Image: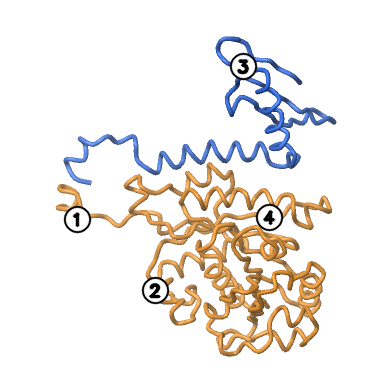
Chain colours: A orange, B blue
Amino acid sequence: MTEFIVVTSGKGGVGKTTTSASIAVGLARRGKKVAVIDFDIGLRNLDLIMGCERRVVYDFVNVIHGECTLKQALIKDKRIDTLHVLAASQTRDKDALTKEGVEKVLHELRDDGFDYVICDSPAGIERGAFLAMYFADRAVVVVNPEVSSVRDSDRILGLLASKTRRAELGAAPVETHLLLTRYNPLRVAEGEMMSIDDVKDILGLDVLGVVPESEGVLSASNSGVPVILDDEASAGQAYEDAVARLLGEQRPMRFLDAPKKGFFARMFGG
Amino acid sequence: MGIFDFLRARNNRSATVARERLRIIVAQERSQRGAPDYLPLLRRELLEVIRKYVNVDQDAVDIHVDRDGEHDVLELSVALPEKAATSANVA
């Protein structure tokens, strides 16, 4: 049984690709056969985050147009055997993705025995974003504790409930999860950033994970190693927890508390 | 937080403001979700017609679609200016 998971957000720059890469790695290193697909046609980036940018020969649109086989286009990860990347095309043709083409590729992955297909959505609500979510069984909605991101996420939740195949068929709705990223516990404690409970209340959805703002994320993308592989980084550990919860494990939330301040800082501010 | 922070107003933290603004806008946008696309245009044209007769505010016309069992009900409410003192309700 193949599960299609879309990673989406509406707003750009909230951490969709970072999340897609880490979830894909997290699932694959538990032995699952995983493909992660970049739906951001024209702005390929997942390959960089995954560290396979120099091995892209064929892309998603090449497969759809029949210019190569799916097998030729899938890039096998060098770290984990069961992990595969399908890069976005860099064409400027907005209509390069078609519903039939995407469906064909997803079905082929299903027939090849993939356990999970992670669809990394582009920002916005245009065709790429629509097609990334259309066939989804589950959705991870990435949200920053910030007004425009929360509002856009709610818009995406509305689209997931109405514009997906599950919605059109009247099947069970897409199972949706919130993933909070760039969470800064110190600013939350100071009342300058919305808390996990605030976001939960506003969107009325449970939270799959909270990824703290962490230096590890930038150094991971700098070096092309998904942050989940960095055991030292709090963000990496938070993603590992999120993947466990995605698979149904119960894990307490970590990294929600601000670091304790010293005596002088508490007395005189800092 | 230092000892002098107690002198500062504590209620108007920006996160609280963000939360309240989002509560309102998200509720409003959810109520419009799934409503027919022509509603904004309908609202604008109605406003133009009403303004031929009464000088109402830009936001005087309020339209939404409610589900009532099997039926969709288009609810239209027009707030007339103070002098008229009543609001006309057409359902």
Q: Amino acid at mark 4?
A: Glu
Host chain of mark 2: A
Query: In the visual, does B85 lie left or right of A109?
Result: left
Is disc 3 placed on a helix, strand or loop?
loop
Q: How far from the left and from the top, in percent, is residue B79?
A: 62, 19
Host chain of mark 3: B
Q: CA distance from mark 2 to mark 4?
A: 31 Å
Answer few, some or many: residues within 10 Å of disc 4's Cα (few below 14, many 20 plus, some between 14 and 19). few
Residue placed under numbered mark 3 in the picture = B80
Q: Which mark is residue A232?
A: 2
Is disc 1 placed on a helix, strand or loop?
loop
Q: How far from the left and from the top, in percent, is residue A86?
A: 66, 79
Q: Amino acid at mark 3?
A: Leu
Image: B75 above or below B8: above
Q: How far from the left and from the top, in percent, is residue A141?
A: 59, 57
> Residue at position x 79%, y 58% from top?
A165
Q: CA distance from mark 1 to mark 2?
A: 24 Å
Residue placed under numbered mark 1 in the picture = A262
Q: Which mark is residue A175?
A: 4
Viewer-side residue, A242 vs A217: A217
Host chain of mark 4: A
Circle 1 or circle 3, nearest the eye: 3
